[in-house]
Amino acid sequence: MRRGRKPAKELSYRDKKIVERYNSTVDTMPRLAKKYGITKQRVHEILKRAKNFGYTINRPKLTIRHHQTDQCEICKRIFEITKKDELVTKRQLAQMLDIEYQVCNWHLNRLKGSGFVSKKFASIRSEKLAKALQYYRYHSLSTKEVGRKFGYKNFYSILNYQKKKGINVERMLQLPIMPKLQQEEQMILLSSIS
């Protein structure tokens, strides 16, 4: 006499839904696992069992030919974020959009390749560096003080390197009107001397 459960002759309702979603959407195994409260391994086992029962597993793939950036919601959201700030990492961008890193990276590469987004957008790899550059941009601390705050010994050279790469790290401070006038007067004096 055998012990244990009898092998199922058919997939359960939940398993059928998982197979259906996997075939019809671009949801990945981790996303399906999170949605249904199971592990990635269990999703893999369900798909394997479904294949044994005769279900076809056809994963829809996004290809460049079929992807239209003007109609894609993710691309539209990435484009909106590019208008706000360019000092983000790809991981931060994926978190802002609440999507997986690979999906975000795929869409971002399509936008960069088509020229809708600058090649320099989301090119910073370190989240700590992105935060330090944002802090430098919007606060009036010196480079030395910002470097000390974020743990960089030579933040000035990091700024110069980012400028050479073409990333805009200019300050966005609202300076008083008087220094601007003095700068304009100096420019006029320099141009008249030349």
Image (tube, rainbow, N blue to C red):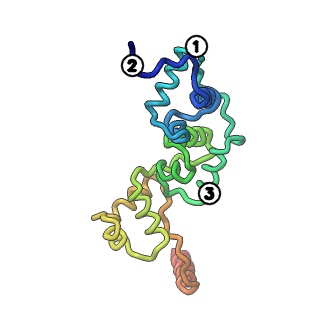
Local crowd at mark 3 within 10 Å, few (<14), some, or many (≥20)? few
Q: Nearer the viewer, residue 19 or 1?
A: 1
Q: Nearer the viewer, residue 119 or 99?
A: 99
For disc 2, the marked residue is 3
Q: Where residue 6 sits in the image (x, y, percent)?
A: 47, 18
Question: Looking at the image, is 75 positioned above or below residue 23?
Answer: below
For disc 3, the marked residue is 83
Q: Is residue 190 visible?
A: yes
Which disc, if any, is residue 54? 1
Q: CA distance from mark 1 to mark 2?
A: 27 Å
Q: Please identify the quarter of the rendering in which residue 39 is found.
A: top left
Q: Residue at x 52, y 14 (%)?
A: 52
Mark 2 and mark 1 in contact (Cβ < 8 Å)?
no
Foreground label between 3 and 2: 2
Sooner in the amino-acid sequence: mark 1 or mark 2: 2
Q: Is residue 109 visible?
A: no
Sooner in the amino-acid sequence: mark 1 or mark 3: 1
Residue at the left extreme of this rendering:
153
Looking at the rendered image, the quarter that the N terminus falls into is top left
Question: Looking at the image, is 133 positioned above or below residue 109?
Answer: below
Type of amino acid under label 3 = Lys
